[in-house]
Amino acid sequence: MLPDTRRIRAYLRWSDGGKSPARYLGQVEHETRAANLAEGWKMAWEMGLLTEEPPAEGSWASSPSVRAVMRGNKNKDTRPELRLRSLLHKQGLRYRVGARPLPELRRTADVLFPKPKIAVFVDGCYWHGCPEHLRESQKNAEFWRSKIEGNRARDAETDRLLGEAGWTVVRIWEHEDPVDACARIEGIVRQASRDATG
């Protein structure tokens, strides 16, 4: 918004080799920020400043925007993992992060307690098919259904293989209260320590 006036100018800015060039789009005058942003994007499209690239060859994404979102998803150090680790650390528990319980098995636990052999996995509701929160995709529905079922099968196989090797597997859904999850894990770790010394 320009000083001493209600006029709002819309600019398109982007990153280019460490620089941030900008292009003036025009004036917008809606009541809400969201409406002004929508108007700005519309102007940029109409001026030919934006293009939609086709998905990369062999990509499973239905559009470039879907591909960008999926590529931006983190597979470690997610917000639920960081919160849980912080709480566990405050309880005096020490652990390894992103480690394989079994070196020969390409499965990585989010939090690992090597001595009591406890592996904690923080599962995303979408990717691991949470029964409470999974909303099936409307686009490429069969692909995503197959992908999530594959993840579920892999999780079950991981639980079985680790259990056979003497590990205790704890699975936490990303939607779970981290305080409750921390208390549950702490109880399991402390009990395993008592059992080992008793």
Image: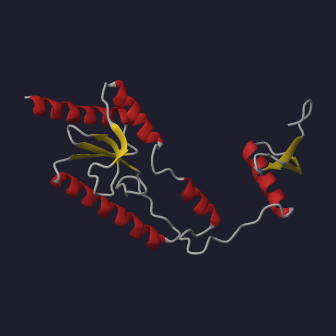
Q: Is residue 54 left or right of residue 1?
A: left
Check the image and report above or below for 158 versus 6: below
Residue furthest to the front in view is 104
Residue furthest to the right in view is 4
The chosen color scheme is: secondary structure
Check the image and report above or below for 58 versus 121: below
Total labels drawn: 0
x 50%, y 50%: residue: 74
Q: Is residue 43 left or right of residue 84?
A: right
x 85%, y 37%: residue: 1
7 or 85, which is in the foreground?
Answer: 85
105 or 67, which is in the foreground?
Answer: 105
Check the image and report above or below for 61 versus 182: below
x and y percent of residue 15 in the render?
75, 49
x 34%, y 56%: residue: 131
192 or 50, which is in the foreground?
Answer: 192
x and y percent of residue 153 in the render?
30, 64
Residue 168, quarter of the rendered image: top left
x and y percent of residue 173 in the render?
36, 47
x 26%, y 32%: residue: 186
Q: Is residue 49 left or right of residue 103?
A: right
Residue 156, quarter of the rendered image: bottom left
* Picture quarter with the C terminus: top left
Q: Is residue 115 left or right of residue 29?
A: left
26 or 89, which is in the foreground?
Answer: 89
